[in-house]
DNA sequence: ACTATATAGGACCGATCAAGTCGCATATTC
DNA sequence: GAATATGCGACTTGATCGGTCCTATATAGT
């Protein structure tokens, strides 16, 4: 059904939240979880994962927590999703896979691989900052309302 | 993980196969299943579904089977996937859903809904014919190699 | 030193869902 | 009437997602 996992959702929400609070040196998993009403333990593990992949910086102990490792503009939705859910492919057999189980049969893959690339491209072009400051960019007058990306399939 | 179900894969493959054999009046589920090494019973149910949604025309009895209900150019990958997997949304809570469980919390959804629309747009722009005759379009010399679609997010 | 607060991470569980199978009814052709 | 098809519902199995629990470790404040 072409759906993002809830974990990835949570991860994106958390990063957005961190991006919206640049003044605080660190926010705990519980802080973020409470803000959104997400299970704290679950979010904790997600943030740990994002830390391991280098998107977050963590600090244990009191007043500890997490902070963005880079500028919000430099973190793409793609990286977040990839960190949490692992590599995704729209088809079971992609050109990434060595060989298709349905050997030469599945000739569908080539065109769909391009769809896959497109999706990846879109997600790569969306940064955490884009998610966070949506209101601003919406409110900005005379701005090209739609157009973060243009791409060719 | 943003993945298509195998059923949708099978469905696309089957339609492609039908598109490649326009001379035969009808092909049985078994014919197609054997051609690709797919479980016949499973494919049967998929084709039945596609028949119910109007993409295929069926004929029972000996020498019966399935045939495309429209020209291969007039059937989009989107329709096929939609028929088989049902409506898909990249996020758990989309603007399609009445209300988000995480009430006003999930502010992620709006930007991602646009990603969702993009994906849908790409899939809508790909027809069964595009899947079937890939070799031809690839072989065609001096043709704009990449470019079925251009879209703005 | 002690305690409260954090991250880090492993084990586990339940619900959901995809994938596939089985069985039976019905239609159609030979 | 037999062989071949579709049509459709029920069921099984395996994977995976979402979530909880428990323990170890780090750190800041009193």
Image: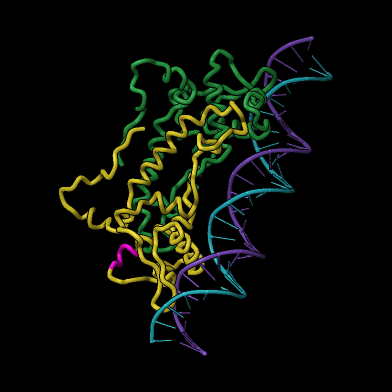
Chain colours: A green, B yellow, C cyan, D purple
Residue at horizontal 50 percent and vertical 50 percent from the top: B86
Residue at horizontal 34 percent and vertical 64 percent from the top: B18
Instruction: Say above or below: C28 vs A76.
Output: below
In the rendered image, residue C17, in percent from the top left (x then y), is placed at 58, 51
Along the line of sight, which residue is nearer the eye, B71 or A50? Answer: B71
In the rendered image, residue B32, in percent from the top left (x then y), is placed at 40, 68
In the rendered image, residue B139, in percent from the top left (x then y), is placed at 20, 55
- Magenta residues span B18-22
In the image, is residue B61 part of the stretch drawn in magenta? Answer: no
Instruction: Say above or below: D16 vs A143.
Output: below
Instruction: Please name the predominant secondary structure of the magenta segment in the image.
Output: helix
Residue at horizontal 65 percent and vertical 31 percent from the top: A38
User: Could you tell whether B141 is left or right of B22 in the image?
Assistant: left
User: Could you tell whether A13 is left or right of B152 in the image?
Assistant: right
In the rendered image, residue A7, in percent from the top left (x then y), is placed at 58, 37
In the image, is residue B19 part of the stretch drawn in magenta? Answer: yes
The residue positioned farthest toward the left in the image shown: B142
Is residue A71 visible in the rendered structure shown here? no
Quadrant where the C terminus of chain B is found in the figure: top left
Along the line of sight, which residue is nearer the eye, A139 or D24? Answer: A139
Is residue B136 visible in the rendered structure shown here? yes
Quadrant of the rendered image containing residue D13: bottom right
Instruction: Say above or below: B22 vs A61.
Output: below
Q: How many marks?
A: 0
Along the line of sight, which residue is nearer the eye, B21 or D30? Answer: B21
């Amino acid at each position: 059904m072409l759906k993002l996992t809830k974990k990835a959702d949570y991860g994106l929400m958390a990063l957005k939240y961190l991006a919206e609070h640049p003044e605080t040196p660190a926010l705990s998993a519980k802080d973020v979880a409470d803000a959104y009403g997400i299970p704290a333990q679950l979010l904790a593990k997600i943030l740990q994962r994002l830390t391991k992949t280098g998107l977050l910086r963590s600090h244990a102990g009191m007043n500890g927590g997490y902070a963005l490792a880079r500028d919000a503009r430099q973190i793409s939705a793609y990286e977040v999703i990839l960190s949490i859910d692992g590599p995704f492919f729209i088809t079971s057999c992609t050109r990434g896979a060595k060989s298709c189980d349905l050997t030469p049969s599945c000739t569908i893959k080539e065109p769909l691989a391009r769809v896959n690339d497109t999706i990846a491209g879109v997600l790569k072009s969306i940064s955490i900052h884009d998610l966070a400051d949506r209101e601003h960019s919406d409110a900005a007058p005379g701005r090209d309302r739609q157009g973060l990306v243009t791409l060719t399939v």
